[in-house]
Structures are given as structure tokens and as C-alpha cells.
Amino acid sequence: MKVALVTGASRGLGRAIAIHLSKDLGLHIIINFAHNRDSANETLEEIKNNGGSGELLQFDVKNSDEVKKSINTWMENNPDKFIEVLVNNAGITKDNLFPWVSEEDWDEVINTSVKGMYNCTQAVIQKMLRKRSGRIINIASLSGLKGVPGQTNYSAAKGAMIAATKALSQEVAKRNITVNAIAPGFIISDMTKDLDEAELKKMVPANRFGKAEEVAYLASFLASDKAAYITGEVININGGVYA
């Protein structure tokens, strides 16, 4: 059975991606979460209500020992299942102008996105290489492409994910593994709930914030056989605000 592991899948973009990978591609979904089991269960319930299958797997993507132990144990207990799709979605923001960004906030943001991507990809890539099949999708951001004031830490984290996507894609392409990044702009989610949507949407040619489902449609396409010849790409989904 083919499986997708989606990190940070208890809410927002992660939840939408998990639901659509199940609905569109019939994948069994591993819903990763760090703390909020209730929200993760809501994701699972929605997948099941749509006729799909899934399960929860709790670990903090920043903690390499926790990631290895959780994923290795899952693999040992599920020898008939193969994690063919990995979506590195887990990420956090700790916004502030650079002179006031604490070392703790810098490390937390960088480690969640970048170290988290490293930990989770390391845990699954050996089997992908042996199976000669895989899809790795990294959820980056507009911030990692153009830089956003007040988000130096987040821009650095997402920029690193983009660079890693391009390098890794070249290493594993011969094994039929694709590695791509999605760079969302303003998307309606928990991360943007405190932003002034009415004011900020004036910057967007499409004159609105995007929906989590619209990002999920793109992730679903990149995880499918239809995208087998697309790798090393960073695909913007931002309503035209930056190209």
C-alpha cells in the first residue's frame, strides 16, 4: 500500500494537503502532529468521512531522535506499506524586525522548517531509493523567494528549503524520485489569521487571499504520476503578487 506522510497535518495547509492526497490519489495518510492530537484527529475524521484511510503519528520534526524512532517503528510495524510521498509542511513563524529577533526565535523557526525537512527526508529517502520511486514536496513560501520585512528568520528558513529542494532533486532524479517546492503567498490559514486581509489583498493582483485547498490541489498534482517529469521546481501560488 502506498502512503503519504504529511508533517504538521493537524491544521491549515497540512490538513488540506492530507485530505486531498487521500481523496485524489487514494493514498493512506500518516498525519504527523507535534502537540494537538484533537486537531490531528479532526483531519483523520475528515479523511475517513471521504472514504479514505489514515493514522496519526506524533513527533516533533525538530527532534532527530524522535523522528527516527517514530518513523522506523512505523516502518517495522507496516512492512507492507511504503511511504512514497513525503510532504515537509511543518513550519512556524516568530515574526519581528531583525534587531529584536531572539536567538531562541531564530533557532525555533529555522529548526522547524529546515532541520525538520532534513530529519523527515532522511528517515524515508533510503527506502525511496531502494524502491526507485518517491515524491518529496517541500512547502516553502513567498518569503523564501522575495524576502519579507519582519520575517528574516522565516525567509531564511524557507529560502534554505528552496535551495535544498534544487540540490536534492538532482541527486535522486535517476531513481525516479522527484523533489519540488511549493511557495504559497497569502493563504487563509492560522498563520495569516492575524494579518490585515482587507489591506494586504490590495497588493495581490487576484485581489484575494488564496485558499488552503488551492495549495492542496497543487501538492496533489506534484504527488501524482502526471508530474513524473517535474523536479527541482519551485512553484509559486500567490495570486500574481510575485513571479
Image (cartoon, grey):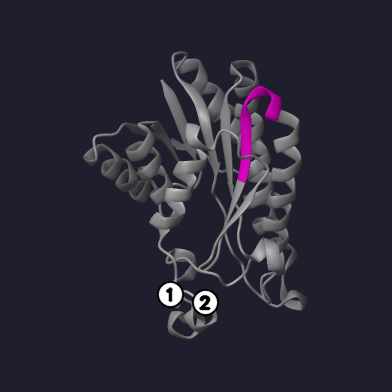
- Distance from Cα at disc 2 to Cα at disc 1: 7 Å
Q: Residue furthest top?
A: 79
Which residue: 51% across, 33% down? 85
Q: Where is residue 97 drawn, in percent x and y?
A: 70, 78
Identity, as a three-letter code, of the amino acid under mark 2:
Val
Q: Where is residue 4 drawn, in percent x and y?
A: 46, 33
Q: Nearer the viewer, residue 121 or 110?
A: 121
**Looking at the rendering, which quadrant does residue 188 occupy?**
bottom left
Location of mark 1 (residue)? 208
Q: Is the Cβ of the residue at disc 2 closer than 8 Å to that at disc 1?
A: yes
Q: Nearer the viewer, residue 195 or 33?
A: 195
Question: For the residue labelled by badge 1, is the local secondary structure a helix, a strand or a loop?
Answer: loop
Question: Magenta region: which residues?
Answer: 173-180
Location of mark 2 (residue)? 204
Which residue: 62% across, 44% down? 180
Which residue: 48% across, 79% down? 201
